[in-house]
Image (tube, grey):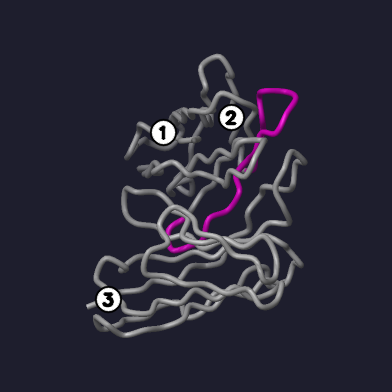
Amino acid sequence: NAGVTQTPKFRILKIGQSMTLQCTQDMNHNYMYWYRQDPGMGLKLIYYSVGAGITDKGEVPNGYNVSRSTTEDFPLRLELAAPSQTSVYFCASSYGTGSSSGANVLTFGAGSRLTVL
Amino acid sequence: AQSVSQHNHHVILSEAASLELGCNYSYGGTVNLFWYVQYPGQHLQLLLKYFSGDPLVKGIKGFEAEFIKSKFSFNLRKPSVQWSDTAEYFCAVIANFGNEKLTFGTGTRLTIIP
């Protein structure tokens, strides 16, 4: 049972380069999320998706793009990498939101550490 | 909008000491509350959650948290910590209404000295 799989685990980019962080989940979850984690700042939501074909901005979307063509996949694209995007990126999924006890429980991937030089 | 505060940024304890990590949230309505743990080099894992009912919630590895609605708090406790509890701990909240998404606190780094 793989859960949430992220690739790559590590990447170094030069300023201005572009790349895509891949995220796949095999739990048939409707909701998927991208967070970035910076020291002392906790996790900030970049983008999220409530189902295939539907995405929306989170707290810190600038410099990123996402797509959700299937339930399983939720790639995060950096178009013009900047040093401020040096961070650890986590993809997560949940089966929904609402008041039921399992709905808001997020399952996280292992993270992708990105350095922009 | 909802927010979460974790006032302890770094806590250092000796093995067998008791632990309490503070978490306060701001939101006037019904909320769901979580503690996640991130062991060194690993991803976040759910430690425990509160949705409704008994305000004292028990999680994995002997952790528990108490929801005190009047204080907007959800503090994490463990009576006797172990070296393996060294990790970063994140409190998170989500409003049980509307289109809010899970909001995380800034985290508390816990270091246990053998």
First to last magenta residue range: B39-60
Question: What residue did someone put label 3 on?
Answer: A116
- The subunit carrying tag 2 is B
Is residue B19 something that shows in the picture? no
Q: Classify mark 2: residues with Cα within 10 Å, few (<14), some (14-19) or many (20+).
A: many
Q: Which of the numbered marks, if any, corresponds to residue A28?
A: none
Q: Classify mark 3: residues with Cα within 10 Å, few (<14), some (14-19) or many (20+).
A: some
- Rendered position, A66 above or below A49: below
Disc 2 secondary structure class: strand
Taking the spot 48% from the left edge, 53% from the top edge, the residue there is: B38
Does residue A28 appear to the left or right of B50 in the view shown?
right
Q: Amino acid at mark 2?
A: Ala
Q: Amino acid at mark 1?
A: Ser
Question: What residue did someone put label 1 on?
Answer: B5
Question: What residue did someone put label 2 on?
Answer: B65
Residue A116: % across, % down:
27, 76
Residue in the foreground of this view, choosing between A74 and B99: B99
Q: Is residue B40 magenta?
A: yes
Q: Nearer the viewer, mark 1 or mark 2?
A: 1
Residue in the foreground of this view, choosing between B41 and A44: A44
Residue A106 falls in which quadrant of the image? Answer: bottom right
Disc 3 secondary structure class: strand
Residue A51 falls in which quadrant of the image? Answer: bottom right
Q: Amino acid at mark 3?
A: Val
Taking the spot 34% from the left edge, 56% from the top edge, the residue there is: A38
Q: Classify mark 1: residues with Cα within 10 Å, few (<14), some (14-19) or many (20+).
A: some
Residue A60: % across, % down:
40, 57
